[in-house]
Amino acid sequence: MVYVKGSTFTMGDTRGRDTQPVHPVTLDDFYIGQTQVTQALWEAVTGDRPSHFHGDNLPVESVTLSECHSMIQALNALCGLQFRLPTEAEWEYAAKGGQLTHGYLFSGSDNIDDVAWYDQVDRPQKVAQKMPNELGLYDMSGNICEWCEDIYAPYPADPQCNPTGAQTGSYHLARGGGWNRGGHMCRVYDRGNYRPEYASNAVGLRLVMDVPQGDAK
């Protein structure tokens, strides 16, 4: 897990679809997984391997939102911690590099091939083979799309503090693009949304954990 120092950042972008209005968001500190959850970790926790493409160091995919919640609940019971899915705002802030951001179009570079697997490949790739972003996070752009906790809603115009999305709705956010997506969908601000029962060989997850009181750096 990588420590992410919270701050206020600009969420959204004028160049994307459904990424306006651009608005300020303030976040607390949090930890986020350096890589997407691998099949080895998923199987160690659940005893199951649901992915379409198999490999210990491949990201787990073909998992619904409820299956992700069940895996995280089992992981928390095993290790006594409180992992969860990221909020959409946490995801975007981390993908952009947090306080270390250079303002890249993709997570870690303006050149997509430096950091992302997208529709130039025919399957997911092992995690952490491309360059990391400013925070040392891998595959925030491309490889697989990542479930977020939020229910989808259009962006508000007002400043937000630790936003958690809509209260009700039929679709949940997923971010990052994927191996079967065009490069434009791997931009740090682009949004995807799916029904929670959706399972695809290009959708998986990354873990987040709150910073315990007194542990802020």
Image (cartoon, rainbow, N blue to C red):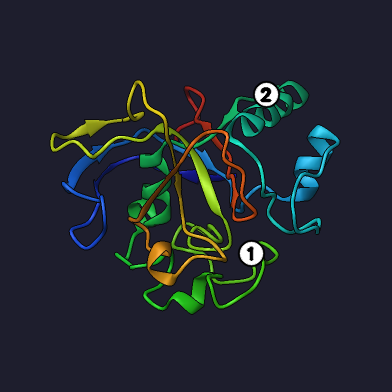
Compute the Cα span from label 1 to label 2. Answer: 25 Å
Q: Name the residue rendered at 53%, 33% in the picture.
A: 196
Secondary structure at badge 2 equals helix
Q: Name the residue rendered at 51%, 71% in the picture.
A: 115
Where 115 sits versus 192, above or below? below
For the residue carrying disc 2, how many other residues have a C-alpha within 10 Å: few (<14), some (14-19), or many (20+)? Answer: some
For the residue carrying disc 1, how many other residues have a C-alpha within 10 Å: few (<14), some (14-19), or many (20+)? Answer: some
Q: Is residue 55 left or right of residue 127?
A: right
Q: Name the residue rendered at 43%, 63% in the picture.
A: 186
- Report the amino acid beneath label 2: Gln
- Report the amino acid beneath label 1: Ala
Question: Which quadrant, please, contains the C terminus?
Answer: top left
Q: Position of residue 50 (x, y in %)?
A: 77, 44
Sequence order check, earlier mark of 1 and 2: 2
Nearest to the observer: residue 24 or residue 51:
51
**Which residue in the protein does label 2 denote?**
73
Q: Position of residue 185 (x, y in %)?
A: 40, 63
Give the foreground label among 1 and 2: 2
